[in-house]
Image: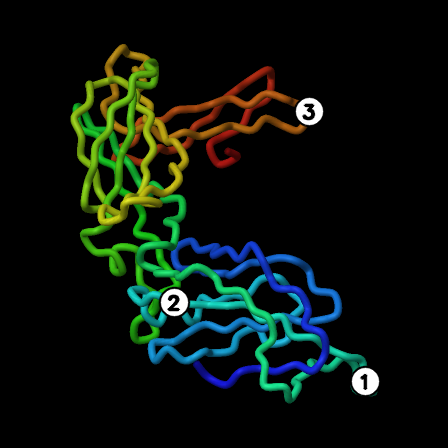
Amino acid sequence: MGHPLFFTSTPPGKAFNLTWISTDFKTILEWQPKPTNYTYTVQISDRSRNWKYKCTGTTDTECDLTDEIVKDVNWTYEARVLSVPWRNSTHGKETLFGTHGEEPPFTNARKFLPYRDTKIGQPVIQKYEQDGTKLKVTVKDSFTLVRKNGTFLTLRQVFGNDLGYILTYRKDSSTGRKTNTTHTNEFLIDVEKGVSYCFFVQAVIFSRKTNHKSPESITKCTEQWKSVLGGEWPWPSVHWEARLPPHRSQHVPLWFKHSEMSLGCLRVSFGGSAFSSGDI
């Protein structure tokens, strides 16, 4: 594969603990130890099975290989880290390329298949709405670093129907959990009217046997509050937090019914300090 590197001095030690760190196809190869009298050069195989040089002559212990692996996320890549000695000269430190016809010591990384091996990042709940006995949750279709025709592709565009989401939800006052799975980015589940619910989502790649779930998203909660007249609001609530003047240490949570109507101007008095919704 390609043209070998050569050395003339005593070969340095090999790199070890080679590890692929990859999330949503952002992919870095890491290793140890920190070099002393030598540098590292990384090689990665392309689809023609030729070695391509990356991070040549580096003293770092990592190399970003994202631009290579996103060319074909269904290809199995091989990579290795070479330890190449250097010497001091009038031009500074120079990497030694000898004439003994031997390769410098190297260590192979395990093979890497991006579609199977990249981790899925923490999903984001884009919006949610509880309307009566229905709870609708929409998950954001996050972008990856995979490109097509110069445009970044989303997770859905890369994985298609192989990508799904799991919604875990519970009543706000309960510890009992239920789950619901979808092959899309939306959930519509039956809930009890007037009851608040808390929930989070996880992405899942159905074809994977391992490493198939993402971390949990941030937990969100709906709020079903009763109006001052005793009527129940089946709409999602909008939470405003009123910040008092600097000499006050308390916050006042204000809850408004969400509707098509304008909220208008609200004026609140607290401890002798008055402020309007424009100050919130």
Do the numbered discs 2 and 3 sit on residues whose CB atoms are within 8 Å? no
Q: Secondary structure at mark 3?
A: loop
For residue 10, which quarter of the picture? bottom right
The residue sitting at 41% across, 35% down in the picture is: 218
Residue 30 at x, y = what percent?
A: 55, 58
Residue 150 drawn at (x, y percent): 34, 74
How far is the residue under mark 1 from the one under mark 3?
66 Å
Which labelled disc corresponds to residue 247?
A: 3
Q: Is 16 on the left or on the right of 98, as rendered?
A: left
Cα separation, mark 2 vs mark 1, equals 37 Å
Task: Give the Cα distance between marks 2 and 3.
Answer: 61 Å
Badge 2 or badge 3: first in the primary sequence: 2
Residue 14: image quadrant is bottom right
| Quadrant of the frame with the N terminus | bottom left
In front of the other: 215 or 222: 215
At 19% from the left and 46% from the top, the residue drawn is: 184
**Residue farthest toward the top in the current orientation of the protein:** 230
Check the image and report above or below for 124 versus 225. Answer: below
Q: Secondary structure at mark 1?
A: strand
- Image disc number at residue 89: 1
Q: Amino acid under label 2?
A: Tyr
Question: Which circle's residue, 2 or 1, is located before the other in the chain?
Answer: 2
Mark 1 or 3 closer to N-term?
1
Q: Residue at x 68, y 24 (%)?
A: 247
Determine which residue is flagged by label 2.
77
Q: Position of residue 73 (x, y in %)?
A: 32, 65
Q: Is label 2 or label 3 in front?
A: 2
Mark 2 neighbour density, 10 Å: few (under 14) some (14–19) many (20 or more):
many
Residue type at tag 1: Ser
The three-letter code of the residue at mark 3 reads His
Quick check: 224 left or right of 26? left
Q: Is residue 164 above or below residue 81?
A: above
